[in-house]
């Protein structure tokens, strides 16, 4: 009951934050709009063509995430971007359940309560739950169940929970391989055959290679994987031997590693389960994309269930060691109540609680209790009135945040994209939107607005940075 109660509570909190941020117009074409267009296509029985990326762009050529199709029935029943927001909240909150249950089994209700609350309020999950929608929402609970099964030495369950990760995102195949290697390692410790674990590891590596080298290029309009160049050396601009040098530079990467370790009071580093973080951390730290290096965005969500599973496993190991030490000292078999929690475990749990409390105001979960987050500003009222002038089932070229408000009822492209054919029926832009510079450069937006007006588009609204143009 504790585990499911905490999960329900965090699901409600994530939903409140996510829905309210969409209500306030803070969600974006990149990424809520993109994923809604993909899920909308699945719901209609079509390939995931996403005009926000480019005309006729199949999203399976960007990242490999066919598991998104599972959201199609829910979206067909409730065709709204909020369907994705709520689904993400439920999926991420589900990760609390296996970790809390395992912590309860290992150390009792108080530690279970701490682990459950720290997981649900962890900076990586909270940031992702409030950041539009991403496919890794499926990975968070799958990793929680897989890591917990590994810690409990249930290899079949760990393998079955990890295999769907192959359909969540292309890089997670390496995490599946890491699960397989840990299964093989445990088998050798238990004097069993490591072959099943090694087979899973090979499957993970092979699936990653197949996806990156065959599947993604087959769907990609450029015939390749768009993110190879972020390793730099893949484009021939730097020798391969320089890649390891990037692991620790610039220093913001050390902040990421420090915060991950501190999240579990540094005790999680004592568990081999923490090695499941290595594939994700590897590509993030080696990448030339600075967004991957820090503690913002949604990229750390998949690491949270792993580090907390490592924490619970480390607590178990410490208590087992304390039991063995107590038994060998007394010369008798330990009976009766469970042994006292070792001092280092208590210190680690205290640090975990402290990190959770300190980071909570820095991430969006605190918006639930902020009155200003629930107010409707005059600017928001004006924006809504402008968007209501756009009929359903039309074509629209929009700026980043406005696009996410329209993808549920119109075919939307970005305003900076060159139009196909006669052009969109409507053009709508918020020039005061701070995200308008990405993914569209300011100069590109200005150029296209001038082009639309030169083609005779009527200016219906031009007030305080809000611009609405209608096709002549």
Image (cartoon, rainbow, N blue to C red):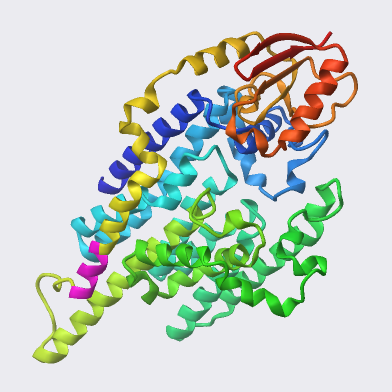
Q: Residue at x 66, y 48 (%)?
A: 65
Query: Is 425 within the magenta?
Result: no
Q: Quick one: 60 or 71, which is closer to the camera?
A: 60
Residue 402 visible at all? yes
In depth, the one of 22 and 246 nearer the eye is: 246
Q: Which residues are magenta?
A: 342-350
Quadrant the N terminus occupies: top left
Quadrant assignment, res 412: top right
Residue 392, relative to residue 22: is it above or below? above
Residue at the outermost right position: 421
Magenta: main secondary structure equals helix
Q: Is residue 104 above or below residue 324?
A: above
Residue 13, located in which quarter of the rendered image? top left
Residue 9: image location, x then y, percent = 32, 38
Q: Residue at x 70, y 14 (%)?
A: 468
Horizontal and vertical percent position of residue 335:
11, 77
Q: Residue at x 72, y 38 (%)?
A: 441
Q: In the figure, is residue 218 to the left or right of 462?
A: right
Residue 177 figure quarter: bottom right
Could one spot residue 46 in this view of the protein? no
Q: State the image coordinates of residue 424 (x, y, percent, origin top left).
A: 80, 19
Give yes or no for residue 343 being in the magenta stretch: yes
Q: Position of residue 217 (x, y in %)?
A: 82, 54
Q: Is residue 408 above or below residue 97?
A: above
């Amino acid at each position: 009951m504790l585990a499911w109660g905490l999960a329900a509570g965090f699901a409600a909190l994530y939903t409140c934050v996510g829905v309210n941020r969409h209500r306030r117009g803070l969600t974006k074409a990149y990424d809520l709009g993109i994923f809604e267009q993909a899920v909308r296509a699945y719901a209609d029985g079509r390939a995931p063509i996403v005009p926000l990326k480019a005309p006729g762009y199949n999203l399976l050529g960007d990242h490999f995430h066919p598991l998104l199709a599972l959201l199609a029935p829910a979206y067909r029943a409730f065709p709204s971007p909020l369907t994705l927001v709520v689904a993400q909240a439920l999926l991420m909150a589900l990760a609390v359940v296996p970790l809390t249950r395992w912590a309860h089994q290992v150390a009792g209700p108080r530690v279970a309560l701490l682990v459950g609350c720290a997981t649900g309020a962890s900076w990586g999950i909270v940031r992702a739950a409030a950041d539009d929608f991403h496919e890794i929402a499926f990975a968070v609970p799958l990793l929680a169940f897989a890591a917990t099964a590994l810690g409990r030495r249930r290899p079949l369950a760990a393998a079955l929970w990890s295999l769907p990760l192959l359909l969540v995102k292309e890089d997670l195949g390496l995490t599946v391989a890491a699960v397989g290697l840990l299964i093989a390692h445990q088998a050798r410790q238990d004097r069993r055959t490591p072959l099943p674990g090694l087979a899973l590891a090979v499957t993970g590596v092979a699936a990653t290679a197949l996806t990156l080298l065959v599947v993604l290029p087959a769907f990609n309009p450029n015939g390749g994987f768009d993110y190879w160049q972020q390793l730099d050396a893949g484009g021939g601009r730097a020798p391969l031997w320089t890649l390891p040098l990037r692991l620790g530079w610039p220093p913001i990467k050390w902040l990421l590693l420090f915060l991950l370790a501190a999240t579990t009071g540094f005790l999680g580093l004592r568990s081999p389960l923490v090695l499941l973080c290595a594939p994700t951390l590897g590509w993030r730290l080696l990448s030339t994309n600075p967004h991957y290096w820090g503690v913002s965005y949604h990229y750390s969500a998949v690491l949270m269930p792993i580090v907390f599973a490592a924490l619970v496993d480390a607590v178990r190991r410490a208590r087992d060691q304390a039991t063995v030490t107590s038994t060998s000292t007394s010369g008798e078999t330990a009976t009766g109540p469970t042994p006292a929690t070792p001092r280092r475990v208590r210190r680690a749990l205290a640090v975990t609680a402290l990190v959770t409390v300190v980071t909570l105001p820095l991430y969006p979960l605190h918006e639930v209790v902020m009155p200003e987050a629930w107010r409707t500003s005059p600017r928001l009222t004006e924006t809504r009135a402008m968007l209501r002038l756009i009929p359903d089932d039309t074509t629209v070229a929009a700026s980043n945040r406005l696009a996410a408000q329209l993808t549920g009822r119109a075919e939307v492209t970005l305003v900076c994209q060159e139009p196909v054919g006669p052009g969109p029926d409507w053009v709508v832009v918020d020039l005061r939107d701070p995200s308008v510079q990405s993914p569209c450069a300011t100069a590109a937006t200005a150029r296209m607005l001038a082009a639309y007006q030169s083609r005779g588009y009527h200016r219906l609204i031009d007030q305080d940075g809000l611009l609405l143009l209608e096709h002549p």
